[in-house]
Amino acid sequence: MKEAQTFTIKQTANQTGISEDTIRYYEKIALLRRAERKDNGHRIYRQEDIDTIQLISCLKKTGMPLDEMRPFLAVSTDADPAEYPELVELLRSHRENIVSQIASLQQVVDFIDMKLENGRYRRDCSEEIQDGMSEDRMEEPKPKSVSTVQMSYFSVSAGTGKSPTL
Amino acid sequence: MKEAQTFTIKQTANQTGISEDTIRYYEKIALLRRAERKDNGHRIYRQEDIDTIQLISCLKKTGMPLDEMRPFLAVSTDADPAEYPELVELLRSHRENIVSQIASLQQVVDFIDMKLENGRYRRDCSEEIQDGMSEDRMEEPKPKSVSTVQMSYFSVSAGTGKSPTL
DNA sequence: CTATAACTTGGAGTCGACTCCAAGTCAATA
DNA sequence: TATTGACTTGGAGTCGACTCCAAGTTATAG
């Protein structure tokens, strides 16, 4: 019976927290497929679109640029991704990114906690500064360490070299 | 006679992973204090500056705009923050932000895991859509394995409803 | 019948954060 | 002496992601 409830752009904006303008923009850049129109030209959205918009806003939080989201949206609307091994790789790799972002964030939390508890020392919060390819030898003993933050956070992936575009 | 080792801008860039241009830019917008110059006008950096730059790049990962970093940098270079109760509040509030960002990221990880394990369903990944901010689920129910990253991250506070400025 | 509201369109403008450039200085080297 | 390389400066350009605008359409209310 309930033949898919539909929503106006305003309702959709309210439900997703994404502005109407932005939703139109996403359509403009083909991040969202062209929405159906009513006879008067007004856009029509249904739950599935809202889901997609929510996934976008979710991915945004991971710092992913809009352009890179398309494959993920494909996974989301299409069937299961196992059919697209390429996509599976993408998912895995983004997953690693996020996990390492979480580690970074956790470091900042630790930094803050440290500051709050004993506003005294300083240090930590580095991670994966690319080095090695510098001809200019940096004979730095680097006494700094990950301190404060337990290594456990890094056990997972510790960076693929991809810096989060946050 | 260990008189604080100094670095060129290039060395500093290498050590921090932040480009020379960007470092100069940070100085231009007064995010970094004007670096000392040698007689020939070249900038001189010391460990303390590198620490600051690293803190900036750390805060960047939390999605904080450069403009908002100044108070944090003050905390970092000055003495302990307990003297500036205003700052303490700031730290606390940013901490909350980060923790809730971590939660968001974890949701994406879960989404991906779900997709990877059984490319089938969809759902989740919302959080704080303005519209009756009465949702506080996500205390720990989650049937899905939080995978890889332990729930320990959430043990701390788990969000106040402050939206991350990502 | 008008006016208000909710939409449509294409395109221009904004903003943050770089990133690049040209022109110049200075030191060491071929 | 001429070139190279590492730097300096101010300013312009780029890029992503919006955000705003003007002009137009349609629907409903007074």
Image (cartoon, coloured by chain):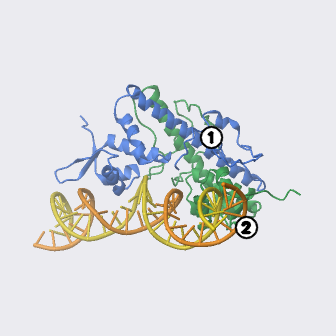
Chain colours: A blue, B green, C orange, D yellow
Mark 1 vs 2, N-terminal side: 2
Residue at point 50%, 47% (across, down): A63
Mark 2 = which residue? B38
Mark 1 = which residue? B153
- Residue A15 at what x, y percent from top left? 38, 49
Quadrant containing the N terminus of chain B is bottom right
Position of A34 with respect to D13 (left or right) is left
> Which disc is residue A113 wearing?
none
* Badge nearest the viewer, 1 or 2: 2
- Residue A148 at what x, y percent from top left? 73, 44
CA gap between label 1 and label 2 equals: 46 Å
Q: Secondary structure at mark 2?
A: loop
- Residue A83 at what x, y percent from top left? 37, 25
Rendering quarter of residue D18: bottom left
- Residue C27 at what x, y percent from top left? 72, 64
Question: Residue flagged by tag 2: what amino acid is it?
Answer: Lys
